[in-house]
């Protein structure tokens, strides 16, 4: 083999190796952001799983707190609490409840609970007071509220300490997807009033 052919083969081989290195470098530069994105996504997923586990444990703690408060309510003879009777007996049902409603809204406000929706259901047929028809009326407040875990816990404590007989009929707690410390809560509160 003469030197000319050798140099030609050497140049072609060298050009091939340089081209392969350039292509590998270009491929690496193309894949590096995708790889970094994959690693970042994996880290975000781990953080979100940890946040979900934390929220689930907070929700379980809230449910346990509700159960404890219910036991305390029963142990303290909550059933012996007075049923609200308006001072002016000529008021219609809606006006008579205004004192109770105002107290509940003030308790929510003082515990940093934001109320964004309320529905009123007067004398729900499934309530035992209504079924007994013994001179009592009932209003179910279906509240949609927003607050932190501790604020909600304090609000429930205030409701249980309230001097008039009220009951929590339902609750549904969902954490806000952007901030797991904020809870969306659907709360059913029954308030009772003597009609005579």
Image (cartoon, rainbow, N blue to C red):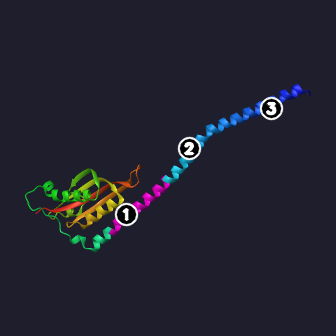
Residue 124 in view of the camera: no
- The magenta segment is 48-68
Alpha-carbon span between mark 3 and mark 2: 36 Å
At 76% across and 31% down in the image, what residue appears?
16
Q: Secondary structure at mark 1?
A: helix
Q: Are marks 1 and 2 in contact (CB under 8 Å)?
A: no
Label 1 vs 3, first from the N-terminus: 3
At 30% across and 63% down in the image, what residue appears?
154
Decide which of 17, 142 is in the foreground and name it. Answer: 17
> Does the magenta stretch mainly form a helix, a strand or a loop?
helix
Q: Position of residue 171 (x, y in %)?
A: 33, 58
Label 1 vs 2, first from the N-terminus: 2
Q: Position of residue 13 (x, y in %)?
A: 80, 31
Label 3 vs 2, first from the N-terminus: 3
Q: Is residue 130 left or right of residue 15?
A: left
Q: Is residue 65 magenta?
A: yes
């Amino acid at each position: 083999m003469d030197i000319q052919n050798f140099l030609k083969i050497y140049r072609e081989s060298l050009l091939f190796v340089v081209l392969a290195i350039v292509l590998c470098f270009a491929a690496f530069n193309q894949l590096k952001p995708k790889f970094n994105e994959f690693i970042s996504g994996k880290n975000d997923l781990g953080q979100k799983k940890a946040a979900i586990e934390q929220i689930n444990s907070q929700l379980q703690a809230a449910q346990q707190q509700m159960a404890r408060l219910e036991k305390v309510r029963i142990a303290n003879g909550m059933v012996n609490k007075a049923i609200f009777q308006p001072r002016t007996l000529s008021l219609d049902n809606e006006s008579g409840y205004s004192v109770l409603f105002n107290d509940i809204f003030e308790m929510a406000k003082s515990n940093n609970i934001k109320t964004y929706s309320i529905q009123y259901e007067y004398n729900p047929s499934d309530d035992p007071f209504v079924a007994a028809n013994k001179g009592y009326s009932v209003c179910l407040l279906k509240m949609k509220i927003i607050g932190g875990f501790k604020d909600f816990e304090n609000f429930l404590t205030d409701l249980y300490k309230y001097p008039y007989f009220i009951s929590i009929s339902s609750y549904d707690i969902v954490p806000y997807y952007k901030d797991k410390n904020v809870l969306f809560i659907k709360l059913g509160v029954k308030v009772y009033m003597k009609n005579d």
